[in-house]
């Protein structure tokens, strides 16, 4: 069918041809649903005022998707665009990629960017609108890594969901223990540690008196042979905390939860070993370079590679990458006034991993890195939560440089930012103290920077 497109002419004093401002002459827009795929092919010659439009509707089964892909191949468009609707776009994307369409020709966009107005939404209208956006080039590509990284992403998200479920089950088990009088958390610093978990099993055995005391003593004797931190509580204190009011039915429920929790932990460890092996075999160099970043351990490096891979050429700048992660401050400016600058959603699995690494930097006490100093500097002004997000933002920028430039992370040994920040705070305190009645501050500073050699004496006046 022929669709007329009214485009205003540009008057330059000479006859001009009515033309639409397009980057591609042909495009296919696909409206993706769980049970239906609606595709729209648009083709128009540059310099012409009309274009052709053709629709194709198929189901969403694999056989139906192959029919749709064959139709796309017969039209041979310059670009194909689709919305990132849930998980339903993934199979279609994979089929297009398998059938010879390069990743440059397949575009996945966020539905919020091309969302039509209310009351003007149809399946064919959405597909036509997508094709128009594709021809005009008015879209922002979503980051879609290669097929092997997409597989690692799926495995990592499955593992992350499993670990989240484990944490929830542990909390519920601790609630069940505390609700029946057991206060094991009061004698064990790490309730999720090996010794604490063994004590929980002993408590749920249902034994009392000397039998319970003997089993607890065996657990403590085995603990002394292991390396690491040890429980400082005595056997009497543990026996007192272990006293509970479990009925036989509640004991069975608690035992089943402990058994299910052990199975989940074993399953999570097995899944992580599979992912770890794939990452080490395919991305060993990047895996080792990422671990040069402070507080990035094996698990964090695996999570970063699973979400990003080793190719970030889709991002035009480090700012765009940081914004995509959801850790950079957002922009909300209207009428020249800046409103809330909260971070965006971003990639939740990568964001969670970087926040955990930032927490590790915050917990470092000895041999502080520049990232730890950054955390301390910001936390003293804006609090711990904002400081962790700021460190995670810094980590995202470091990771971008490591991946794109093939370098390792090296701390700056001349970083005095924390010292300078605290000395500025001290100067402000001195200025405030000078204006306080009854307090006199005398400052003696030698040559050079004032924080190199600073002798301050505070004399409280006795005059009332």
Image: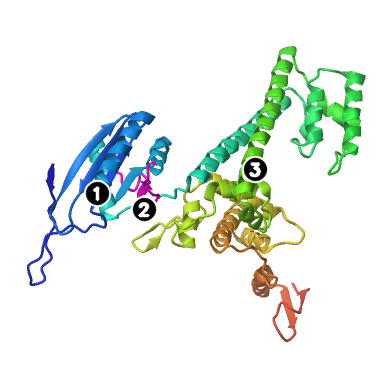
* Disc 2 to disc 3, C-alpha distance: 34 Å
Q: Looking at the image, is 408 positioned above or below residue 247?
A: below
* Sequence-first tag of 2 and 3: 2
Residue 75, quarter of the rendered image = top left
414 magenta-colored: no
| Residue 461 shows in the view | no
* Colour setting: rainbow
Are there few (<14), some (14-19), or many (20+) residues within 10 Å of tag 3?
few
* Sequence-first tag of 1 and 3: 1
Disc 3 marks which residue?
277
Percent position of residue 462, x then y: 78, 73
| Residue 378 shows in the view | yes
Disc 2 marks which residue?
140
Percent position of residue 180, x then y: 73, 22
Q: Looking at the image, is 402 positioned above or below residue 326?
A: below
- Left or right, 121 with respect to 143, comes to left
Percent position of residue 318, x then y: 49, 62
Question: Residues in magenta?
Answer: 99-115
* Disc 1 to disc 3, C-alpha distance: 44 Å
* SS at circle 2: loop
Q: Which mark is residue 132?
A: 1
Q: Which of 104 and 211 is in front in this view?
A: 104
Disc 1 versus disc 3: nearer the observer: 3
């Amino acid at each position: 069918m022929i669709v007329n497109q009214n485009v205003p002419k540009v008057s330059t004093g000479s006859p001009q041809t009515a033309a639409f401002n397009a980057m591609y002459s042909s495009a296919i827009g696909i409206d993706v649903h769980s049970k239906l795929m609606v595709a729209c092919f648009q083709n128009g010659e540059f310099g012409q005022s009309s274009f052709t439009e053709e629709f194709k509707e198929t189901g969403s089964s694999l056989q139906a998707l192959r029919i749709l892909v064959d139709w796309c191949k017969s039209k041979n468009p310059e670009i194909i665009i689709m919305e990132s609707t849930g998980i339903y776009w993934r199979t279609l994307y994979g089929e297009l990629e398998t059938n010879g369409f390069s990743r440059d020709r397949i575009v996945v966009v966020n539905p919020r960017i091309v969302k039509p107005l209310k009351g003007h939404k149809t399946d064919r209208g959405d597909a036509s609108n997508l094709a128009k956006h594709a021809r005009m080039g008015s879209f922002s590509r979503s980051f879609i890594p290669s097929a092997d990284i997409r597989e690692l992403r799926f495995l990592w998200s499955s593992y992350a969901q499993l670990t989240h479920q484990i944490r929830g089950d542990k909390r519920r088990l601790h609630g069940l223990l505390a609700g029946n009088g057991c206060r094991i958390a009061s004698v064990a610093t790490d309730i999720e540690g090996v010794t604490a978990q063994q004590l929980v099993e002993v408590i749920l055995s249902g034994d009392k008196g000397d039998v319970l005391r003997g089993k607890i003593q065996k657990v403590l004797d085995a603990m002394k042979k292991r390396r690491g931190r040890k429980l400082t509580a005595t056997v009497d204190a543990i026996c007192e905390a272990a006293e509970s009011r479990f009925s036989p039915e509640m004991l069975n429920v608690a035992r089943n939860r402990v058994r299910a929790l052990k199975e989940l932990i074993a399953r999570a460890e097995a899944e992580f070993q599979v992912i770890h092996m794939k990452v080490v075999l395919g991305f060993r160099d990047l895996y080792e370079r990422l671990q040069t970043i402070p507080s990035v351990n094996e698990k964090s490096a695996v999570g970063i590679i699973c979400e990003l891979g080793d190719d970030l050429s889709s991002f035009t700048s480090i700012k765009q990458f940081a914004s995509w992660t959801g850790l950079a401050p957002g922009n909300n400016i209207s009428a020249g006034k800046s409103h809330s600058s909260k971070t965006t959603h971003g990639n939740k699995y990568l964001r969670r991993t970087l926040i955990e690494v930032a927490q590790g930097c915050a917990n470092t006490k000895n041999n502080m890195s520049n990232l730890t100093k950054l955390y301390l500097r910001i936390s003293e002004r804006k609090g711990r939560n904002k400081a962790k997000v700021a460190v995670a933002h810094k980590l995202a920028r470091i990771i971008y440089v490591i991946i794109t430039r093939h370098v390792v992370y090296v701390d700056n040994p001349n970083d005095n930012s924390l010292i300078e920040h605290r000395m500025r705070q001290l100067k402000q305190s001195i200025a405030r103290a000078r204006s306080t009645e009854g307090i006199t501050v005398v400052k003696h500073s030698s040559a050079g920077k004032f924080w190199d050699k600073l002798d301050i004496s505070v004399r409280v006046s006795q005059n009332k």
